[in-house]
Image (cartoon, rainbow, N blue to C red):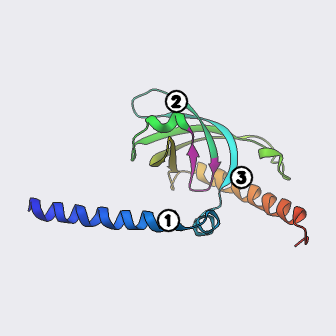
Amino acid sequence: MLLACAILAAAVAAVAYSANLRLRRRTPEQRRIQRRYTRIPMSLPVDIAPPDGTTVRSTAQNISVDGMLLTKAASSLRVAEPVQLSFVLPRDPAHLAFVLPQDMPVDIPAVVWRHQGHDAVVRFDPTHPQRKTIQHWVAHAERSLKQAEAETSPTGV
């Protein structure tokens, strides 16, 4: 039984390793296209509350409907650890072309999905109602980014 578990673990590790190699060979543009949700680049302060009751301040590097990438302060978090995130989505992120009626405070449960160097990727609770707020905000930001790209493209297309 122990031998079977060891063989299974080795097989899973080999598959994960080969998948990771395939990802590394792709260009950043190919990886961006593969993503399920658009990421909005931004710098946003985030309070992270792990189950131990402490609060850690970090900065989001990007946000999507599904989650966000948090900077170095999040490296102390463990993968699969549940956390509570608190942040405010600004009315006008990075001075994009749209303005929402007000800043949108968000308090949403999430889980640490993976580490990326010293940074951490967290995924929002898909059933939490605050996810709709994030979805609305990201949709506006995505439209504004596409509009800005079209205006700055040399062909105007």
| x, y percent for residue 34 | 58, 69
Q: Amino acid at mark 2?
A: Val
Residue 3 is tagged as none
Query: Going by the image, does 124 lie left or right of 134?
Result: left
Nearer mark to the viewer, of 1 and 3 = 1
Q: Residue furthest left?
A: 1
Nearer mark to the viewer, of 3 and 2 = 2
Residue under circle 3? Answer: 137
Residue 56 is tagged as 2
Query: Going by the image, does 121 lie left or right of 19?
Result: right
Label 2 crowd (10 A; few <14 / some 14-19 / many >=20): some
- Span colored in magenta: 62-71
**Residue occupying image coordinates x 82% and y 50%:** 96
- Quarter of the image where the C terminus is located: bottom right
Task: Name the element at disc 3.
Answer: helix
Task: Name the element at disc 1.
Answer: helix
Asked if the residue under mark 1 is in contact with the one under mark 2, i.e. CB atoms within 8 Å, the reply is no
Nearer mark to the viewer, of 2 and 1 = 1
Q: Residue furthest front?
A: 25
- Quarter of the image where the N terminus is located: bottom left
Label 1 crowd (10 A; few <14 / some 14-19 / many >=20): few
Magenta segment, principal secondary structure? strand
Q: Is residue 51 above or below residue 42?
A: above
Front residue of 71/38: it is 71
Nearer-N-terminus badge (3/2): 2
| x, y percent for residue 40 | 69, 53
Q: Is residue 132 above or below residue 46?
A: below
**Residue occupying image coordinates x 58% and y 49%:** 68
Label 3 crowd (10 A; few <14 / some 14-19 / many >=20): many
**Cα distance, mark 2 to mark 1?**
31 Å
